[in-house]
Amino acid sequence: MDLHFDRVLPPNIDPARVGASEVWDTDLHLPCGSRVHVHAPSGSGKTTFIHLLYGLRREFRGQYRLDGTNSGTFKQSDWSRVRGETLAVVFQDLRLFPEATGWENIRLNAELAPAGSPAEWRAMAERLGMGGKLERPVQTLSQGERQRIALVRALSQRFRWLFLDEPFSHLDEANIALARELLLERAEQEGAGLILAGLGFEYHVPNEIELAL
């Protein structure tokens, strides 16, 4: 599934930033399987970009196409199908259920379109140092622990694209390295692309596409 931005421009973007942007108001083609790092300072539209990609933000000029199909023609049922079958996301605000456990949050999402088995999901959590905390309510976890739960939740489903909005903001360098390794491994297994929106250059993988927002 290739992604195309044909002169896409949401109404809330500062006009002063548009001229220097490699995303807004451009002709942008991202082939499936691409590794993309979109970097920009806070308040420049990173979350708007991720929400637009995931179909949550639909007010914009231009055309956003998925495999040649104009997303503007999608009904809510179309977006539900596309998200369930091809798109995974880690939101900046994570959108976990705070009173549910980490494991319950993972299972609730994964069972809609699972990739792998519960044993494999637990193994991913173990790799990120969360194996002993899966049965704790999310509201009792630190922000960094919650980020790792959200990462496992996204990686436990099928996807052709994984969208990530500042997913490492509360992780130290060691945990960023572990998370990056797992993300790339799962993307390779799924034959999928990654788009990470972040403040700086915390991504760094071979053949990465760098885009200024």
Image: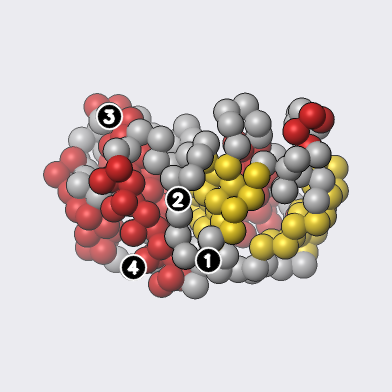
- For the residues bearing labels 2 and 3, Cβ distance under 8 angstroms: no
Closer to viewer: mark 1 or mark 4 = 1
Where is 189 relative to 24, above or below?
below
Nearer-the-camera pick, 205 or 196: 205
**In this rendering, position of residue 40 left or right of residue 110:** right
Identify which amino acid the numbered label 3 is placed on: Ser
**Tally of marks:** 4
Q: Residue at x 31, y 51 (%)?
A: 177
Q: Label 1: which residue?
A: 207
Residue corresponding to mark 4: 116
Query: CB under 8 Å between callouts 1 and 4?
Result: no
| Disc 4 versus disc 2: nearer the observer | 2
Q: Which residue is tagged 3?
A: 142
Q: Residue at x 58, y 42 (%)?
A: 39
What separation in Å lies between label 2 and label 3 (alpha carbons)? 22 Å
Using the numbered discs, state the Cα–Cα distance from disc 1 to disc 4 in whole angstroms: 27 Å
Tell me the quarter of the image containing the N terminus: bottom right
Picture coordinates of residue 165, whole percent (x, y): 51, 41
The reply to whether discs 4 and 3 touch (Cβ–Cβ < 8 Å) is no
| Displayed quadrant of residue 83 | bottom right
Q: Secondary structure at mark 4?
A: loop
Q: Which residue is mark 2?
A: 203
